[in-house]
Image (spheres, grey):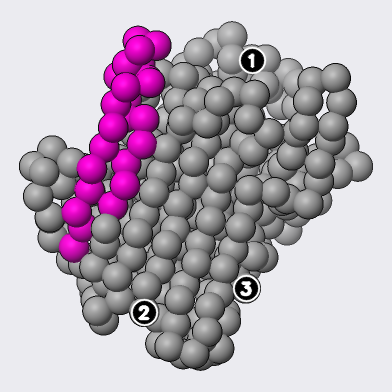
């Protein structure tokens, strides 16, 4: 069975998803949906499919599933519309920009009798998956403290232009990694933010947010996220995870993917794992994520990213933003397993 998929959103991530679906041998890209006719038509024409202006238009077509890859603050509308219509959704992370929004999406999935898979990309990264497996196997004993974060190039913050928080565009990766790899929920956070660089460019956004986190078993954590690296920095995304345990350590360092190019433009360390192009096709973590979604839809199987986990990530980010505002530690609202069975 070939799964027919429509991609909602023709921005940076939408185009990547659309191309990945179009190149899949198990899926067919049936439409690109975007209210911006110029962006939507350009992507659709490039990939040999149709452009549709509205999600409702695509729901009238022969479409098995949807990828929703619009900015996070616009997730709720298209995701709930598609889910209530009974079509499964691969939803670009984060699930929503508020816990209220995430819960609305979860309710829509229940009403439509279908499921939503949130695209927590690092769950398809062999390095992070290896770290989670090592901790689960007890290789480092009981976790004591954990550090997770990423510092991206300022170009990303400028491109986002205030449409997302550094916490949701970047930080949700590391919140998910901390909870997934340790197997423990974050229960309390104390966070501080700095906003100098982005406002100097007319962008209403934080530059970076740092957080001290309490986990449910007494483990403590540090989260760091920012888009402050210079544009000419050879490290595009400084991503790291380290878990110190009673018997050992597990660490992931993605500042260098093992590929270095040095020329007239200086030193570059291109992406070699997230969505690299190999033999004219997108491969890596994104392709693995799309394959997993397609396989689950085709086989009627459970999605590999639990909805409860995605909702817990948003709950942590909500608490972090409250802590930045209040200047005090804030408790993370509980999302239990019974809240979402999907």
User: Please, what secondary structure does the residue beneath circle 1 have?
Assistant: helix
Mark 2 sits on what residue? 144
Mark 3 sits on what residue? 130
Residue span colored magenta: 188-211
1 and 3 marks in contact (CB < 8 Å): no
Q: In this rendering, does residue 212 appear at all?
A: yes
Q: Position of residue 341 (x, y in %)?
A: 33, 71
- Is 338 positioned to the left or the right of 40 in the image? left
Is residue 253 part of the magenta span, yes or no? no
Q: Which mark is residue 41?
A: 1
Task: Determine the residue positioned at 79% across, 20% down.
Answer: 265
Q: CA distance from mark 1 to mark 3?
A: 40 Å
Q: Nearer the viewer, mark 2 or mark 1?
A: 2
**Figure label count:** 3
Task: Determine the residue positioned at 9% across, 50% down.
Answer: 328
- Farthest residue, direction right: 279
């Amino acid at each position: 069975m070939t799964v027919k998929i429509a991609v909602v959103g023709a921005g940076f991530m939408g185009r990547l998803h659309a191309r990945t679906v179009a190149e899949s041998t198990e899926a067919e890209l049936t439409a690109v949906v975007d209210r911006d006719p110029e962006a939507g038509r350009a992507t659709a024409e490039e990939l040999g499919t149709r452009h549709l202006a509205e999600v409702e238009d695509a729901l009238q077509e022969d479409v098995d599933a949807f990828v929703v890859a619009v900015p996070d603050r616009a997730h709720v509308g298209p995701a709930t519309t598609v889910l209530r219509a009974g079509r499964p959704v691969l939803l670009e992370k984060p699930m929503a920009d508020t816990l209220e929004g995430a819960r609305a999406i979860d309710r829509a999935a229940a009403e439509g009798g279908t499921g939503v898979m949130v695209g927590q990309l690092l769950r398809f990264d062999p390095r992070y998956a290896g770290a989670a497996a090592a901790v689960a196997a007890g290789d480092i004993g009981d976790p004591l403290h954990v550090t997770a974060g990423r510092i991206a190039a300022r170009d990303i913050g400028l491109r986002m232009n205030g449409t997302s928080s550094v916490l949701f565009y970047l930080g949700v990766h590391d919140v998910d990694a901390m909870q997934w790899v340790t197997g423990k929920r974050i229960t309390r956070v104390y966070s501080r933010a700095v906003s100098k660089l982005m406002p100097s460019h007319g962008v209403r956004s934080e530059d970076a947010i740092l957080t001290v986190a309490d986990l449910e078993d007494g483990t403590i954590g540090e989260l760091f996220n920012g888009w402050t690296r210079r544009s000419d920095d050879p490290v595009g995304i400084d991503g790291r995870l380290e878990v110190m345990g009673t018997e050992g350590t597990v660490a992931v360092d993605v500042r260098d993917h093992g590929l270095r190019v040095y020329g007239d433009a200086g030193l570059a360390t291109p992406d070699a794992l997230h969505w690299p192009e190999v033999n004219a096709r997108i491969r890596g973590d994104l392709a693995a994520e799309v394959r997993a979604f397609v396989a689950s839809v085709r086989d009627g199987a459970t999605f590999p990213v639990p909805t409860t986990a995605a909702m817990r990530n948003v709950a942590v980010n909500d608490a972090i933003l409250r802590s930045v505002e209040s200047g005090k530690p804030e408790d993370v609202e509980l999302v239990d397993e019974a809240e979402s069975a999907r």
